[in-house]
Image (cartoon, rainbow, N blue to C red):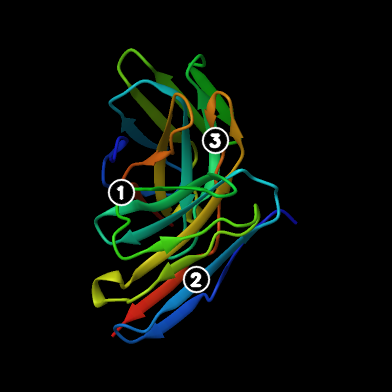
Amino acid sequence: SQQGEEDPQALSIQEGENATMNCSYKTSINNLQWYRQNSGRGLVHLILIRSNEREKHSGRLRVTLDTSKKSSSLLITASRAADTASYFCATAPSGNTPLVFGKGTRLSVIA
Amino acid sequence: EAQVTQNPRYLITVTGKKLTVTCSQNMNHEYMSWYRQDPGLGLRQIYYSMNVEVTDKGDVPEGYKVSRKEKRNFPLILESPSPNQTSLYFCASSRLLAGGQETQYFGPGTRLLVL
């Protein structure tokens, strides 16, 4: 029951550029979360934005949420080679139902 | 240190030989979950547990069993592994608040090859 869908599937940019990834979902949510995964490793939580929030920042990360369009975006500013990873959005439906992960965006930052 | 541990990290086995992958968390989380990750298919949930003695099927439960006898442990059991269960497996845990799922903490993964 995959709900979140990231776009694009893959993104390649130069170091120093900004990277934007989008996530669309289908049903109402309590919160939306972004995770990062380095190749073959466990996912690491980046940021959580609640349904009543529109924007959130954490260091070089900026997340927006538009519940009317059922979409979110993750912006990484001034990207570095170390940002190369896969990024997943996960939606938390209302109530005690499991997080639903998208298939991820693979980001390559070229030095 | 808050963490989710999985063992073993790597496992090669043969078809039909029962195996167990252990998962343990030290954060007193109510919620625990198992996922498998395959190229092009993203993360797919196998089973999850809202609390001790409460387990439920995820999207791909066939061929797997779980148990939650203690809050900290959530082992994944493959009674009769088959080659299509070759995959990268992740255990995760989180708090479970009234408003829904909070941040999930993932284990390092278990890479399983079934011959």
Quadrant in the picture for the C terminus of chain A:
bottom left
Lateral position of residue B70 relative to residue A32, left or right: right
- The residue located at (61%, 43%) in the rendering is B30
| Residue at mark 3 shares a chain with residue at mark 2 | no
Lateral position of residue B36 relative to residue A44, left or right: left
- The residue located at (41%, 56%) in the rendering is B35
The mark nearer the N terminus, 1 or 2, is: 2
The residue tagged 3 is A47
**Residue mark closest to the camera, 3 vs 2:** 2
Q: Nearer the viewer, residue A47 or A19?
A: A47
Q: Residue B60 in the image: state x and y as whole percent.
A: 30, 54
Circle 2: element type: strand
Q: What is the chain identity of the residue bearing mark 3?
A: A
Q: Amino acid at mark 1?
A: Asp
Distance between the alpha carbons at the discs numbered 3 and 2 = 29 Å
Q: What is the chain identity of the residue bearing mark 1?
A: B
* Label placed on residue B21: 2
Quadrant in the picture for the N terminus of chain A:
top left
Q: Amino acid at mark 3?
A: Ile
Q: Residue B101 in the image: state x and y as whole percent.
A: 52, 34
| Viewer can see residue A39 | no
**Residue mark closest to the camera, 1 vs 3:** 1
Label 2 crowding class (10 Å Cα cut-off): few <14, some 14-19, many 20+?
Answer: many
The residue tagged 1 is B59
Circle 1: element type: loop
Q: Nearer the viewer, residue B37 or B24?
A: B24
Q: Residue A74 in the image: state x and y as whole percent.
A: 43, 33
Circle 3: element type: strand
Distance between the alpha carbons at the discs numbered 1 and 2 = 19 Å
Label 1 crowding class (10 Å Cα cut-off): few <14, some 14-19, many 20+?
Answer: few
| Residue at mark 1 shares a chain with residue at mark 2 | yes
